[in-house]
Image (cartoon, rainbow, N blue to C red):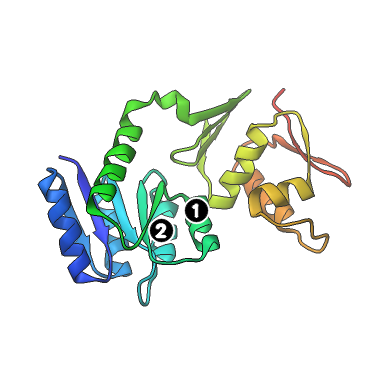
C-alpha cells in the first residue's frame, strides 16, 4: 500500500487531509511538528511527504533539508501559505517535487499526489540519469558515480554538477556558474563557486573538473 506522510502544525488540517487520503486508499502517517515529521520521514520511508512550510521551532525548509540530506529520493509536496516567491523557489531548488498554496482544495491536492506518484513509477529509470563519459548523475537521488565510485551530493553540489554535465568539455566561467546555480549576478568578492568545486572534487576518485585559469572550470570527460 502506498504510504503518505502529512506534516502540518494545524491538527484540523491534518485530519482533513488524512480523511481525503484514506478515502483514496492511501496509508497515512501524520505529524504535527517538524521534528516529529523529520523522524518519521527517515524511519518510516513514506512514498510521498506532504509538508507544511511554516511551522514553529523546526520549519518546513529545515525538515526538507534534513530529509533530503539523508534520503535524497524522498518525494516532498510542500503546502505553503507563504507569498514570498523566493521561499517557494528555494523549496523547488532544494528538491521539492511540487508546491501547493494554502488554502487549497482537497481534490487538487489528491490530483497532484496521484500525478507525482505516477511520475515516479511510469518513467524509465535511465531518463533520470545524466551521463557524460565515465560520469553518471542520478537526478532523483543526487548520486554521482565516477569510475564505479559513488557519492551523494548536497543541493548546491548537485546543481553545480548538473550544470557541468549538460555542458561537457565546455569552459564555464565563474559568473555563469554563480548565476546558474546560486542565482546571483557576478560578484568578484565571492568564492562560493570555488568552495563548491572543492567539495565536489573531494567526493570523486579522480578530478574530472579542471580549472581554467582566470576564467572558471571545465568538465573533462575524455
Near mark 1 (Cα within 10 A), the count class, few <14, some 14-19 or many ≥20, is: some
Query: Which residue bears the numbered disc 2?
Result: 64
Q: Which residue occupies the foreground of this view, 75 or 84?
A: 84
Picture coordinates of residue 154 (x, y %)? 53, 51
Could you tell me which quadrant the N terminus lies in?
top left
**Helix, strand or loop at mark 1:** helix
Picture coordinates of residue 108 (x, y %)? 28, 48
Q: Quadrant of residue 189?
A: bottom right
Residue plotted at (12% across, 49% down):
22
Q: How many marks?
A: 2
**Helix, strand or loop at mark 2:** helix
Q: Quadrant of residue 80?
A: bottom left
Q: Is residue 52 above or below residue 105?
A: below
Q: Is residue 84 left or right of residue 15?
A: right
Could you tell me which quadrant the C terminus lies in?
top right
Mark 2 near mark 1, Cβ–Cβ under 8 Å? yes
Query: Which residue bears the numbered disc 1?
Result: 94
User: Going by the picture, which residue comes out furthest to the bottom?
Assistant: 57
Residue plotted at (27% across, 71% down):
9
Picture coordinates of residue 38 (x, y %)? 32, 62
Picture coordinates of residue 144 (x, y %)? 53, 37
Amino acid at each position: 500500500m502506498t504510504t503518505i506522510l502529512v506534516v502540518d502544525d494545524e491538527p484540523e488540517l491534518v485530519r482533513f487531509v488524512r480523511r481525503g487520503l484514506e478515502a483514496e486508499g492511501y496509508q497515512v502517517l501524520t505529524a504535527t511538528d517538524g521534528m516529529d515529521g523529520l523522524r518519521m520521514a527517515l524511519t518510516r520511508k513514506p512514498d510521498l511527504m506532504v509538508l507544511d512550510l511554516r511551522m514553529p521551532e523546526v520549519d518546513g525548509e529545515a525538515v526538507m533539508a534534513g530529509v533530503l540530506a539523508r534520503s535524497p529520493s524522498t518525494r516532498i509536496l510542500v503546502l505553503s501559505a507563504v507569498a514570498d516567491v523566493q521561499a517557494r523557489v528555494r523549496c523547488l531548488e532544494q528538491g521539492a517535487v511540487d508546491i501547493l498554496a494554502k488554502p487549497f482544495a482537497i481534490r487538487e491536492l489528491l490530483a497532484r499526489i496521484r500525478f507525482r506518484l505516477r511520475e515516479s513509477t511510469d518513467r524509465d529509470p535511465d531518463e533520470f540519469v545524466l551521463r557524460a563519459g565515465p560520469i553518471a548523475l542520478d537526478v532523483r537521488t543526487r548520486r554521482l558515480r565516477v569510475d564505479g565510485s559513488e557519492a551523494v551530493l548536497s543541493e548546491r553540489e548537485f546543481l553545480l554538477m548538473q550544470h557541468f554535465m549538460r555542458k561537457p568539455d565546455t569552459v564555464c566561467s565563474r559568473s555563469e556558474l554563480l548565476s546558474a546555480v546560486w542565482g546571483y549576478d557576478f560578484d568578484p568578492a565571492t568564492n562560493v563557486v570555488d568552495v563548491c568545486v572543492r567539495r565536489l572534487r573531494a567526493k570523486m576518485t579522480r578530478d574530472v573538473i579542471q580549472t581554467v585559469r582566470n576564467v572558471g572550470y571545465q568538465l573533462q570527460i575524455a
